[in-house]
Amino acid sequence: MQRLSTSQADFDARLKALLAFETAQDPAVDAAVAAICDDVKARGDAAVVEYTNRFDRMSAPDMAALTLSRDELAAAHARLDAAVRDALEVAAARVRRYHERQLASSWSYQEEDGTLLGQQVTALDRVGIYVPGGKAAYPSSVLMNAMPAKVAGVGEIVMVVPTPNGEKNDLVLAAAYIAGVDTVFTIGGAQAVAALAYGTETVPQVDKITGPGNAYVAAAKRRVFGVVGIDMVAGPSEILVVCDGQTDPDWIAMDLFSQAEHDEIAQAILLAPSEAYLDAVAASIAKLLPTMPRRDIIEASLTNRGALIAVKDLDEACAIANYIAPEHLELSVAEPEAWLPKLRHAGAIFMGRFTSESLGDYCAGPNHVLPTSRTARFASPLGVYDFQKRTSLIRVSEAGAQTLGRVASLLAHGEGLTAHARSAELRLKD
């Protein structure tokens, strides 16, 4: 891992270079995705089957072979070991309970002249959730995408998940069953995003697509935005740990590994006000890395984009954290709540030494679909609000039309829009 210090003259430039990530906008990726999306739009099922067979090393004859029903999801749920099934149910219940607090309701108010103004909140009709299925299986992603949609009252949930070599994961399918997914298509990549966005003979067109994926999935989501809604364009997984130097260095090393093991381009960074503590964490990394089954991925991630950064104090660490705006921020310090007012930008904040980021990934309750690549400066975690939309309500009374009509007339004439003005004026009594 890189060793940086805020005392270095070129620290700002080195930090900026460390955070840079542009793969989702790579011209070669965009060109490949554009061709796939256009082909799926033109040829529908035939194109989806062709790309799935090519990229996932399968030999499906048609979309029927790539479609799973609720009965098949139920069968996967029944096949699980009882302890695993119970753990999945506990996680699902916690995720549901947390998201139920996000549910928004319609509202309105009436003015003195009888004019009514308000907002009607309704659920989306149909959504598509993308669940990664390449280097690992992610039942947790199923829960995090489907549960808030279900709580919001979405009418139909369609899930796509790639199954390379035709290998289906019972845990993923069981999670879909628990979360109330209606249909699962075993497809992935840009072709799955395009199928959800445009619709095919078999895959119904959805209103919104959520869920993370690789650079091709990210580029496809960006491309179809406007045809359908999307949650965000997700980059690689990230963790930033701010530590006061008092947490067991083995714990911190493993917390860094927890995101590094996702992908060779995932990012793990530690900020601490002690070079000696950074040395201790580096020693823990060297000691623990050989024991990890995904050692090669972790090592590549830490080498490519990881860093141990010495800071002057925790105030400076918080300032840097706000600049990084990480997906996951572990605040591994004494009295973490005292530092919250200084932290403005993060997808999720994990407070205290016992709150490992991994608990948030699986079962704490808050959503683990979080803004990445510094987008936490303006974006939020996936939630029920992503599956609800708002419609403005306006009922102007006859008395209200007299006042508002005159205001609108003056402003419309000022903009040179005569028909707008006349439309308001025709309702005036004099």
Image (tube, helix red, strand yellow):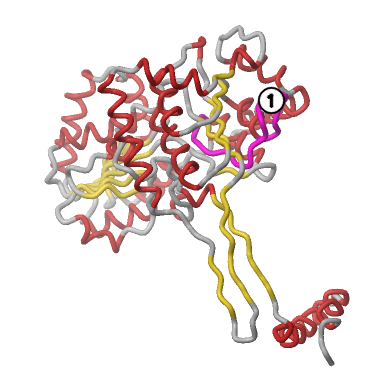
Quadrant in which the C terminus is drawn:
bottom right
Of 27 and 189, the residue lying toward us: 189
Q: Give the left or right position of residue 292, taking residue 235 as reference.
A: left
Above or below for 268 versus 176: below
* Residue 199 magenta: yes
Q: Give the left or right position of residue 229, taking residue 173 as reference.
A: right
Above or below for 76 versus 6: above
Question: Which residue is pictured at 31% across the width and 24% down the height?
Answer: 85
Amino acid residing under circle 1: Ile
Could you say where residue 304 lies in the image, as x and y percent from the top left? 38, 30
Could you say where residue 229 lies in the image, as x and y percent from the top left? 61, 44
Q: Give the left or right position of residue 135, taking residue 184 as reference.
A: left
Magenta stretch, residue numbers: 197-214
Quadrant in which the N terminus is drawn:
top left
Q: Give the left or right position of residue 398, taking residue 241 as reference.
A: right
Of 207 and 378, the residue lying toward us: 207
Q: Which residue is mark 1?
A: 36
Could you say where residue 393 lies in the image, as x and y percent from the top left? 64, 67
**SS category of the residue bearing label 1:** helix
Q: Callout 1 environment at 10 Å: few (<14), some (14 to 19), or many (20+)?
A: many
Question: Which residue is pictured at 40% across the width and 36% down the height?
Answer: 237
- The part of the image, by quadrant, that contains residue 47 is top right
Could you say where residue 143 lies in the image, as x and y percent from the top left? 41, 35
Question: Which residue is pictured at 19% across the width and 48% down the height?
Answer: 352
* Residue 234 magenta: no
- The part of the image, by quadrant, that contains residue 421 is bottom right
Above or below for 146 versus 191: below
